[in-house]
Image: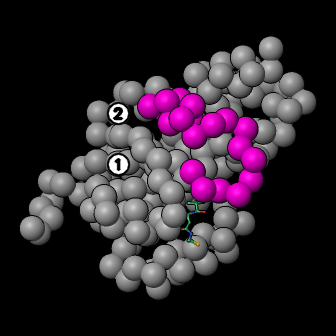
Amino acid sequence: MNKTSSDRLALYPGSFDPFTYGHLDVVERASKLFDSVEVSVASNTSNEPLLGVEERCSLIQECTSHLPNVSVSTFRGLLVEYAGRRGAVALVRGLRSVSDFDFEFRMAFANRRLSPEMETVFLMTSEAHSLISASIVREIHSWKGDISSFVPDPVRRALDERQA
Ligand code: PNS
């Protein structure tokens, strides 16, 4: 069946460890452009995560509960295969600054070679969030610094509880 303009699903994949205000900014922008957006947490990343996949999913759900067309899932294996199974019309990735370009372009070209039909759409985060990265948040948190301006409240509470 052909996709109609009323069922255009975008997949927003990532590690989201943890989910930041920058990620939320991208989800909010994507939710205005597509009929529905699925935020999908990669469960096969090699690094030891700070938060478990299930916890990341439920935190993202809580942080995006004001967006009715946004859902949350988890995936394993190749992103384009999962996106194809879900019937997504595009992959969404956020760009904060030029330093993101190199990695993001290489990933987008690799995904395009694997699945020529799957488009990658880059959305610029707001300037206010352009310096936030999950790794910087993890670093500040590991030294018990204040992360409240980097991550939504549910995420901050979850991280604070782990530290208590
Ligand atoms: O938030 P991140 O860590 O930059 O997200 C990267 C992610 C998870 C989207 C990427 O590593 C990925 O898609 N992993 C799944 C495996 C895959 O499809 N790799 C091919 C793309 S190079």
Crowd rating for badge 2 (residues with CA inside 10 Å; few <14, some 14–19, many 20+): some
Residue at figure coordinates x 31%, y 53% from the top left: 33
Q: Which residue is mark 2?
A: 67
**Amino acid at dot 2:** Leu
**Label 2: which secondary element:** loop
Q: In the visual, does 106 lie left or right of 47?
A: left
User: On residue 94, which mark appears?
Assistant: none
Residue at figure coordinates x 27%, y 62% from the top left: 87
What colouring does the structure picture have? one colour
**Amino acid at dot 1:** Val
Ligand 1 resides in the quarter of the picture at bottom right
Query: Do tag 1 and tag 2 residues touch (Cβ < 8 Å)?
Result: yes
Q: Residue 58's spot in the image, x, y percent?
A: 49, 30
Is 63 above or below relative to 10?
A: above
Of 82 and 133, which appears nearest the observer? 82
Locate the C terminus and report the quarter of the image it occupies.
Answer: top right
Q: Which residues are magenta?
A: 43-61
Number of numbered labels in the structure image: 2
Locate the N terminus and report the quarter of the image it occupies.
Answer: bottom left
Is 145 above or below relative to 40?
A: above
Q: Residue 122's spot in the image, x, y percent?
A: 48, 63
**Label 1: which secondary element:** strand
Task: Say whether residue 157 is magenta.
Answer: no
Residue at figure coordinates x 33%, y 67% from the top left: 84
Q: In the visual, does 86 lie left or right of 80?
A: left
Query: Residue 54: in sight, yes or no?
Result: yes
Of 116 and 84, which appears nearest the observer? 84
Q: CA distance from mark 1 to mark 2?
A: 10 Å
Query: Which quarter of the picture shows residue 53?
Result: top right
Q: Residue 121's spot in the image, x, y percent?
A: 43, 65
Q: Which residue is mark 1?
A: 37
Task: Say whether residue 57 is magenta.
Answer: yes
